Amino acid sequence: MEFWLHFLPIIIYLLLIIILVIGIILSIKLLMTLNKVDKLVDDINGKVQTLNGFFHIMSYMTDKITLATDKVTEGFVNLFKKMFSKKNKIEKDDKDE
């Protein structure tokens, strides 16, 4: 029994030291990994920033093309309205006479 009273605390202390060393090693590896991820995110952010100008130009051009097609469509609709409204007025005038 006395053997266990002296031997068990030594085993527990050794296991705690091993767990502490493993925790320190894992913490260091985690810090290294986080530094690599941070560099990667910064690199990706820089590349995205270079594409922002391109996307801004594309958005501007899309807006202008949409505006032009809306104007053309509106012109055709007005033209068809005028053509059909004249035809309807002529038919109504013929019926009234």
Image (spheres, grey):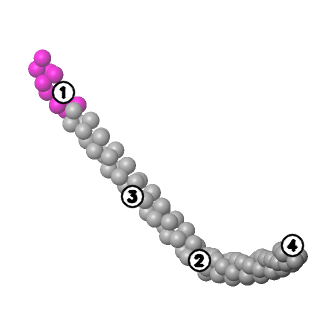
Q: Nearer the viewer, residue 64 or 75?
A: 75
Place of residue 58 in the rendered image (x, y in percent of width and height, measured from the top left): 67, 78
Whether pointer 3 and pointer 1 mark residues with C-beta atoms closer than 8 Å, the reply is no
Q: Residues within 10 Å of mark 1 (few under 14, many from 20)?
A: few
The quadrant holding residue 17 is top left
Q: What is the C-alpha distance between the residues marked 3 and 2?
A: 31 Å
Q: Amino acid at mark 3?
A: Leu
Q: Earlier in the sequence, mark 4 or mark 1?
A: 1
For discs 1 and 2, the disc positioned in front in the rendered view: 2
Q: Earlier in the sequence, mark 1 or mark 2?
A: 1
Q: What is the C-alpha distance between the residues marked 4 and 1?
A: 115 Å
Q: What is the C-alpha distance between the residues marked 1 and 2?
A: 65 Å
Q: Amino acid at mark 2?
A: Asn
Q: Amino acid at mark 4?
A: Lys
Whether pointer 2 and pointer 4 mark residues with C-beta atoms closer than 8 Å, the reply is no
Residue that mark 2 sits on: 52
**Residue sitting at x 50%, y 66%:** 41
Residue that mark 3 sits on: 31
**Residue sitting at x 48%, y 61%:** 37
Q: What is the C-alpha distance between the residues marked 2 and 4?
A: 64 Å
Which mark is drawn over residue 8? 1
Dot 3 falls on a residue whose secondary structure is helix
Q: What is the C-alpha distance between the residues marked 3 and 1?
A: 35 Å
Q: Earlier in the sequence, mark 2 or mark 4?
A: 2
